[in-house]
Image: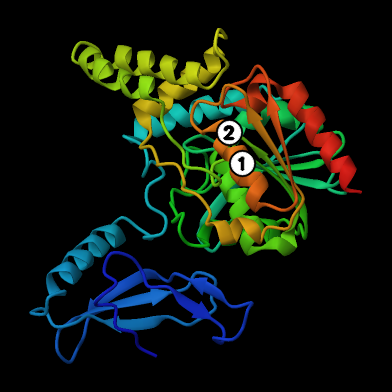
Amino acid sequence: MIWNISRCVSRAPIFTCGSRNDKNSLPVRPMPIAFGHSAENGRLILIWHCSNGSIPPVVVPNVANRSRHGIAIRFVSRVIKMSLACGDIRRMKAHRYHTSHAGWQAMMAWYEQKLARFSVPISSQFVNTRYGCTHIITAGDRCAPPIILLHGTNVNMLGWQAQIEGLSEQYYLIAPDVIGYAGKSDPVRLSYRTPDYAFWLMDVLDALQVSSAVLIGSSAGGFFALHFAYHCPQYVRAVILLNPCGIVPFRFPLNIMRQIPIAYTVGFFSRRMASYWLAKKLAQKNVAPNTQPNPENIHLAYLILKHYIRHHPPGTLQPRQLRQINTPTLLLVSQHEPFLPLRHMLRRATRLMPHIQAHIVDGAGHDIHVERPDFINASIHHFIASLS
């Protein structure tokens, strides 16, 4: 079977595996795995293959070089050629989203140091998904009720340390490094506009043989939790959202935007000083006013600003998508949330989501689970207990 991709040169086309009327059919984006030239006419041949093996490799010929898409396809072929020369196109160098290999090593060294300070037994493992390899930390008894902890944009699972240490006696905690972010998972960034992140998380749960779980998402992790509850509701027992993206648009405060020109000015004299100064400003925004941020959080923000190529936050789910989420949901929003409009979020969530409980938490900024860990852990335990 042959598909023409002359109009899809920027990314792989999406094909549905299954019949058109099959509700269980999954959209799959094939990956280019090889290229060559046709023996008949010398034109470039691209071979696309679905990583989940649902369809066999497909040979896709390009259009004629003189067509209006010829230049674009020749450019894509050059990119693919350079990528293949470095290895598997789906698995670029580990520091693909870092400024350098040394920067990636610095972040991984900090990762290992922070991981070694956990006060409860944890297990580190890697699982394969259709989008790449995912690193996961687990804690607690496998027979206990499972909880999935989904972190926010441009960070990793280490932000859940207080929840892992405080809840591992009652629950089986699963904290993945979201693929494409600043953890140990493969550097493959997926589109927020497609079900890719939902299918990635479904592959993770299938690999761990978890059929149903409570999802807890902070910031962008809230978007992933809502996205998963919409696309794969059979896997979701309940959802707990902590200052989540996905309900209202994410906005950077104006006073943070005003600091950027100052940081550039300071950067002329010392890039290290500029990065640290801006990191401290960002860390300050994640906590309540008149509260000093944790030095470890400042150091993490500094490493991300200096070494990591940041990803933009996700958008919002459509109203029809939010209305179709019938899973029991707990929404906890900080009184001093700087990035998400508090009142607008509460109004939209309670209006569109039929099974939601919403509460405002005093004395916390954006990282509510870091600032108020005891309160958040107690709220999680009470909400899960109320389900049964």
Spot occupied by residue 85 in the image (x, y as percentages of width and height): 27, 59
Spot occupied by residue 361 in the image (x, y as percentages of width and height): 69, 25
Spot occupied by residue 111 in the image (x, y as percentages of width and height): 54, 29
Task: Work out whether residue 158 or residue 126 is closer to the camera in this orientation and state it.
Answer: 158
| Mark 1 secondary-structure assignment | helix
The crowd level at tag 2 (other Cα within 10 Å; few <14, some 14-19, many 20+) is few
Q: Quadrant of residue 270?
A: top left
41 relative to 13 in the view: left or right: left
105 relative to 297 in the view: left or right: left
Where 279 falls versus 342 (above or below)?
above
What distance separates the C-alpha of mark 1 from that of mark 2?
6 Å
Taking the spot 29% from the left edge, 58% from the top edge, the residue there is 83
Task: Work out whether residue 140 or residue 197 is closer to the camera in this orientation and state it.
Answer: 197
Residue kind at label 2, given as amino acid type:
Arg
Residue kind at label 1, given as amino acid type:
Arg
Q: Which residue is mark 2?
A: 343
Mark 1 touches mark 2? (CB < 8 Å): yes
Q: Which residue is mark 1?
A: 347
| Mark 2 secondary-structure assignment | helix
Where 269 falls versus 238 (above or below)?
above
Q: Quadrant of residue 171?
A: top right
Task: Work out whether residue 333 or residue 238 is closer to the camera in this orientation and state it.
Answer: 333
Taking the spot 52% from the left edge, 41% from the top edge, the residue there is 184
Numbered disc total:
2
User: Residue 318 got which mark?
Assistant: none
